[in-house]
Amino acid sequence: MSTAKLLSTYLSQSQKFFLQFGGQGSPYLKELAKLYQDPNLKEFFDVTFQTTSEIYAREKSSPFLNEGFDFKAWVENPDAAPSEEYLARAPISVPGIFMTQIANYVLLTKSGYSTSELLQATGAISGHSQGVIAGAFVGLGKEGKDFLTAYADFLRFVFYLGYNGQKVYPDFSISPDLVQANLDNGDKNPAPMVAVIGYTKDELESRVKETNESLGLKGKDTIYISLYNTPDSMILSALPSSLVKFRSKWKAEMDEKKFKFVYLKTTAPFHCPFMDESLPSFENGDASIVPFPYTGEDLKVPVYSIYDGHNLQSEGNLRNVLFKMVLIEPLFWDLAIAPVIKDNSIQGIIDFGPSVVSQRLTGGHLKALNIEKLSLCVSNAKELKQLIEV
């Protein structure tokens, strides 16, 4: 395999890449179906479908999987796949997004970016929300059979992360009254997470605090800022009944300032204390059938926390660290991508999708700081072509 021109340039000039992976809310099935057509990924998909069939054999009675877990059938005929609402359920979308990201990574390693050379040219890795798990997996630098074994372990882990998260929030149906309350505000598709775009960090924090206090939103009704994505784009996590109250309280101001309020396609309130019970539930149950011997010392490249920006190479076993980071702790994207901003040797960003959401979030930070760096997303056909040119 010839080394890609861009990788050769980085290696010869001691320049580095930052590898990043996207998170919840990104469409993934069409991208995964396209990747499935690539014969170079046959072994990868064989392991994927073997693992998902084993998971389904154990969990098929779950109401969360009432329309199946047959990714093989779905990628072979996406038009016959379940609805977008079903594909957005946490036990479906978390593994679906993960397998799409890793398929993109495998494709790149077979297209001029050998694992050893790519990691040699990588200065840091992170991932937006659940993407940090894909980042940790890639940071292990596994190859061959070891890669496929670890991939199956991680795929099982991300399924049970989403599954246990959904157990904490099992009733994700939306009542007709709540649908109507949102329509009255001009909003559609209510969910337990919503993007609020326009306010600064301080402005949104003060409004969330005022809403919780003035409306008596406590305990399970509390609204949290769960993801600090860019200086003017953040995510709130809460019961949909609480989020519509926030929207109603601030709608006039948001309309006047042309701020946005957009629900995410997800079925659980990630990154907030609402999900505290998910970790003990996992530890006392499904963890026993999820092999996860991977530690910070196993990481060949620094992988950075999305909560406080520390290097995960300093950690022991990574299972609970990653679980908490994705389900319970808030996300601060500026801390996760700090190496891109501070390390002058990092001159390029490779984003593994799905879609281009995380690429845009990082771009928003760089633009605010007037920093220009190469940014290419494997999910974008034009940018992939640029990446793999020899």
Image: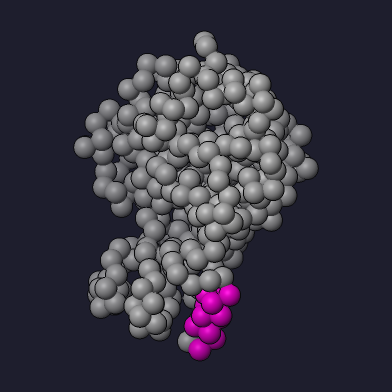
Does residue 271 appear anywhere in the picture?
A: no
Q: How many marks?
A: 0
- Looking at the image, residue 356 sits to the left or right of residue 224; the answer is left
Q: Find residue 312 and report its horizontal and vertical position in percent.
A: 71, 43
* Left or right: where 128 falls relative to 312: left
Residue 337 or 268: which is nearer the viewer?
337
| Point 48% across, 72% down: residue | 199
Please determine whether, in this image, residue 205 is positioned above or below residue 323.
below
Residue in the picture at 43% in, 78% down: 246
Q: Which stretch appears magenta? A: 202-214
The image shows residue 390 at horizontal and vertical percentages of 48, 16
- Residue 115 colored magenta? no
Q: How is the image coloured?
A: one colour
Q: Is residue 285 above or below residue 210?
A: above
Up-down relation of residue 355 to residue 210 (above or below): above
**In front here: 85 or 113?**
113
Q: Write the residue at 29% across / 70% down.
A: 187
x and y percentages locating residue 188 in the rendered image: 28, 66
The residue nearer to you, when weighing 180 against 350, is 350
Residue 114, picture quadrant? top right
Q: What secondary structure prevails in the magenta region?
A: helix
Q: Report the residue that reaches farthest toward the left.
A: 79
Residue lying furthest bottom: 214
Left/right placement of residue 317 relative to residue 222 reads right
Q: Residue at x 35, y 35 (%)?
A: 31
Residue 205 is one of the magenta-drawn residues? yes
- Residue 307 visible in the current orientation: yes
Give the x, y percent position of residue 322.
63, 46
The quadrant in which residue 177 appears is: bottom left
Q: Residue furthest top?
A: 1
